Amino acid sequence: MTVMKNTIKNMKKSTKSNLITYGMVIVAYIIVQIFSTTGNLSSMMQGLLVPLCIYVIAAVSLNLVVGFSGELSLGHAGFMCIGAYVSAFFSSCVGDALPGPLRFLFAILIGAAVAGIFGILIGIPVLRLRGDYLAIVTLAFGEIIKNLMNVLYIGIDGSGLHIQASDGGALVLDAGGKVIVNGALGITGTPKDSTFTIGVIIILITLFIVQNLVNSRSGRAIMAIRDNRIAAESIGINITKYKLMAFSISAALAGVAGVLYSHNLATLTVKKFDYNTSIMILVFVVLGGIGNIRGSIIAAVILTALPELLRGLSDYRMLIYAIVLVAMMLFNWAPAAISWRERMKEKIAERRKHQTKEAA
Amino acid sequence: MAMLEVNNLSISFGGLHAVDGFSMKIEKGELYGLIGPNGAGKTTVFNLLTGVYKPDEGIVLLDGKDITGHSTMDINKEGIARTFQNIRLFKAMSVLDNVKAGLHNHHAYNTLTGILRLPKYFQTEKEMNQKAHEILKVFDLDQEAEVLASNLPYGKQRKLEIARALATDPKLLLLDEPAAGMNPNETQELMDTICFVQKHFHMTILLIEHDMKLVGGICEELTVLNFGQVLTQGKTADVLNDPVVIKAYLGE
Amino acid sequence: MSFISHLINGISLGSVYAIIALGYTMVYGIAKMLNFAHGDVIMIGAYVVFTSMTGMGLNPILSILLSMVVCTVLGVVIERIAYKPLRNAASPLAVLITAIGISYLLQNVALLLFGAGAKTFTNVVTFPSISLAGGKLTITGVTIVTILACIVIMVGLSLFVGKTKPGRAMQAVSEDRGAAQLMGVNVNGTIALTFAIGSALAAIAGVLLCSAYPSLTPYTGAMPGIKAFVAAVFGGIGSIPGAMIGGILLGIIELLSKAYISSQVADAIVFAVLIVVLLIKPTGLFGKNIQEKV
């Protein structure tokens, strides 16, 4: 026992913090499972579990870019979109030729790989831009991807694969052919492979990748570039390589979030992948604390659940959501609010001191 | 062979000859001073040597190798490390991590090894920690290893920058006004540290300063820069007594 | 003929983008923040005109003036309550996210007040259409007024910024806020003034936009807001002529792609052009290239 205590004591601060984050996720999972098996989980909450996982993964992966690489990306939903479409396409094509779990594993790997490749392709030209310019270009990429998916038609028949990009024109297929991607109507009939358990496992893997990356040589290089690009160059760090690494790993993980998304719904359309979703994920990251992974998770869970929990307030729920968001931002970030909080903390601490003195 | 040989280095910005026909030679293990009034082009020389700017003309040879026009990153890999006049630390990283970032190219493992925590990760990180602590000890910073760089007092931030540069294991160390903003005590202490680094690591050092007294104390040779051109260069004592130099500094 | 007609419509739509983009660009230049709620101020402006005309029977000119007053007050209040406290926040992202929160807020307030259904906006422009080339080419009154309004605003704004004392204060604050403050410029007042002007312009843009595209919903402002933001970046964010030219080019590209390529991918083409421009000229067409001093 004491040995264990000592190992914990001697652990690096970052390692301890990482373990707390894993622990938090696992405990939350167990609690949900207990509620679920005892029948205490409303069907609304049941339906929310996979989306929660999706947004947690998206938020943690975006934090890699925003928090650790220090770049503002407003196109994260675009990478989710790619992951979702590619994997749904794959699963629809494969159908029952592969057993479910194996098919889903491949779908995840394919979604991650293709989104990651897009991350590299987009990252190479755009990562030269700085700050707000990068933000607008990533937003533009997200919208372009959404737009293109809207006019994409893919079908399969006896003579092979038919790909067509048009304004609402239907595919001409042989008898017995099957439309897989149907333009703005998207992909229907993707197997519902996403489950809460798989979602949590992927969250843990995402945490493993991001946290270990951050606390490694490459992570130091990424953060060094964020803190001071010129100094990082002067000590021989390859700026392009590490910016691209953070961006593409983040894109791949967002792609996995997209895979979970497309395998959770019967119909996949691009509507959900517009800049509003990208912004929402950014809100999770900033509200949870830029560069704070645990914060991203908590913010993603609360802000995804909040509108659902407020459903009783019907029309007012999004209004309340907006007010809460602005209020929380001001409370968390305004210098005046921060110093007020510090003063309050001191006051409470002082009062406590007094009380203990008087008690003695 | 000289450690650094610069021939006829020139750059102009919009018609202004910031550095014009600059040449110098630094022998291995030497502590060399580059001095001159404000705006003389000293920092521009550093920026040219480290690839921040590409020269319009001229050649830079490091240890006999032509590094003219190479990128900043490659020049560091070739063996030039520097500090900055306006401190450029990795502020949100710990003191230890700042130095470990400097060790980036010398204690390497790939990203996958880092993510998967393979044995090589632990082994290399351990080496890096040891090496970083060793360097920090030289600058009396090892007690503050876990402190955030931005929370260090000013004088120690300057020292940390030198430590980080040294971690890249350079052949030539460029220090841009390392004592700027320090009080006389701190300055003296820093100069002692620089001399120690020169002896202990057999380091070749080129140092920018505009406090002549200070430079005179430790540098073996000097180059005086004025309006982008070399005013005079040679042994410290000779240079400091040169009437041209006195005129450039004090006016007529 | 149809090409010229598309072109003129493009210039007209672009003029609306330009007016919105001016608001973006001025605020960015001075407060160094992307005001994501700007598009929603447009929507509020349009609703004010709609209500005062169809609900209260006010005449168009009075309605527009009322809308400008409401938007100006709204803009200044938003700045004071939501943005000013975050001006010195540790990360510039804080105020960006707050602006997004304000955007949601405005949309949902409009949703509660006016409902989700689209309101049919009555055209406020009574200017007659012009027929050219023997009736083959018709230019609507809205188009003419929009283009004229854009030119007047652009010239007026340039004169204001260049020639007047508060205008020069704006330039000073955008160049170096700290130094401007030391020189006795009222920084808070100048920033508030910028928001006021930007929001008043948003009201005008709202009216013009809805006169040309008469369906008004709580989300009407969002996409034109984003497009105008793109236009501002396109022209070089912070530059007044840049916003103008960026806006007009964007409008032309959008309408020509809709006419000749595909209406579905028109937005994708607009965004692709933006990316190409930024890759060639990373600070936009008229943006200043600032190199970090080492």
Image (cartoon, rainbow, N blue to C red):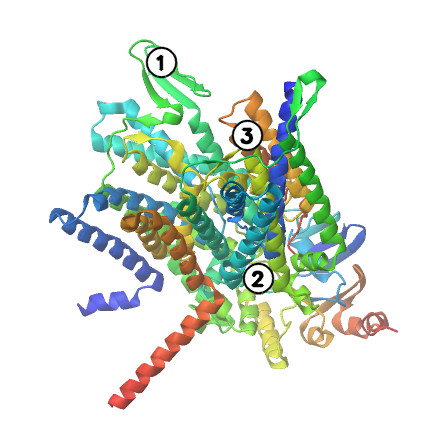
Rendered location of residue A13, percent (x, y): 34, 64
Secondary structure of residue under mark 2: loop
Q: Chain of mark 3?
A: C
Quadrant of res A255? top left
Q: Give the x, y percent position of residue A85.
A: 36, 30
Compared across the picture, whether B177 is left or right of A86 comes to right
The answer to whether the residues at label 2 and label 3 have Cβ atoms under 8 Å apart is no
Considering depth in this image, is A141 or C52 the residue closer to the camera? Answer: C52
> Front-most of B153 and A263?
A263
Residue tagged by mark 1? A160
Q: In the current view of this chain or complex, which residue is farthest to the front? A: C57
Dot 3 alpha-carbon crowd within 10 angstroms: few under 14, some 14 to 19, many 20 or more: many
Label at residue B88: 2
Q: Tell me the chain of label 2.
A: B
Q: Chain of mark 1?
A: A
A281 vs B51, nearest the viewer? A281
Q: Nearer the viewer, residue B140 or A357?
A: A357
What residue is at 66 percent from the left and 29 percent from the top? C128
The amino acid at mark 2 is Arg
Point out which mark residue C269 bears: 3
Query: From the viewer's perspective, is A275 left or right of B63?
Result: left
- Res. A233 in view: no
Which residue corresponds to the image point at 27% horizontal and 36% vertical from the top-left?
Answer: A264
Q: Amino acid at mark 3?
A: Ile
The disc label shown at residue B105, or none: none
